[in-house]
C-alpha cells in the first residue's frame, strides 16, 4: 500500500539483461507508488509470470529470447488480460512504434530512458493513458 492507502502498481519486468533489470527494479522501487513483483528473462517465463502474478503493467523488451517479437503481444494480453504493456526498445523506429500500438501496447520507451521517464510512463499507463517515446501517428515512416 502507498501512503495514501492505495495499493501499489504491480509491475513485471521482461528483459534478459540482468544489469538492466536490477537498475530498473531499483529505480522503480524508489517510487512509493510502485512495486516490481517479478522479472522474466525469456518469453516462456514472461507468459508464466504474467498469468500467475497478474501485474498491472508489464515492461516488455521486444527482443526478449523466445517471445517472437511484437506478434506475441496479443497472446500475452490474453494471458494477462488486466495488464497494460509498455514495449522497451533500443531505438525509436517509427514503424515499430506504430506496430507496437497496433498489437496492443500502451507505451513504447527506449531502454536508455531516464528513471524518471520510466516512473512517469508506468504511472500514466496504469492510469489508463499511454506513453510513447514518439506518438504512433507522428512516428516517421521507417
Image: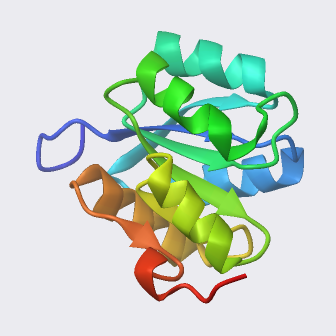
141 versus 80 height, above or below: below
Side (left or right) of 10 relative to 93 = left
Side (left or right) of 22 relative to 31 = right
Side (left or right) of 39 relative to 5 = right
Q: Can you tell which quarter of the image residue 60 is in?
A: top right
Residue 140, percent from left and from top: 61, 89
Q: Can you tell which quarter of the image residue 42 is in?
A: top right
Residue depicted at x 62% and y 12%: 48
Q: Nearer the viewer, residue 124 or 34?
A: 124
Q: Tell how many labels.
A: 0
Residue depicted at x 47% and y 61%: 107
Q: Residue 85: in sight, yes or no?
A: yes
Side (left or right) of 11 relative to 140 = left
Q: Quadrant of the N terminus?
A: top left
11 versus 94 height, above or below: above
142 versus 68 height, above or below: below
Residue 109, percent from left and from top: 59, 69
Residue depicted at x 62% and y 78%: 114
Q: Residue 54: in sight, yes or no?
A: no
Residue 53, percent from left and from top: 47, 17
Q: Nearer the viewer, residue 82 or 53?
A: 82
Q: Nearer the viewer, residue 83 or 18?
A: 83
Q: Residue furthest front?
A: 141
Q: Quadrant of the C terminus?
A: bottom right
Q: Nearer the viewer, residue 5 or 69?
A: 69
Q: Can you tell which quarter of the image residue 80 is in?
A: top left
Residue depicted at x 47% and y 17%: 79
41 versus 95 height, above or below: above
Amino acid at each position: 500500500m502507498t501512503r495514501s492507502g492505495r495499493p501499489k502498481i504491480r509491475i513485471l519486468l521482461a528483459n534478459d539483461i540482468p544489469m538492466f533489470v536490477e537498475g530498473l527494479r531499483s529505480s522503480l522501487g524508489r517510487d512509493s507508488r510502485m512495486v516490481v513483483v517479478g522479472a522474466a528473462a525469456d518469453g516462456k517465463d514472461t507468459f508464466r509470470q504474467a498469468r500467475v502474478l497478474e501485474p498491472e503493467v508489464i515492461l516488455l523488451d521486444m527482443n526478449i529470447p523466445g517471445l517472437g517479437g511484437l506478434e506475441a503481444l496479443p497472446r500475452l494480453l490474453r494471458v494477462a488480460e488486466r495488464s497494460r504493456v509498455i514495449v522497451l526498445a533500443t531505438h525509436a523506429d517509427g514503424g515499430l512504434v506504430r506496430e507496437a500500438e497496433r498489437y496492443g501496447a500502451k507505451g513504447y520507451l527506449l531502454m536508455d530512458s531516464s528513471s524518471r521517464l520510466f516512473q512517469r510512463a508506468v504511472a500514466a499507463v496504469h492510469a489508463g493513458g499511454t506513453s510513447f517515446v514518439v506518438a504512433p501517428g507522428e512516428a516517421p515512416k521507417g
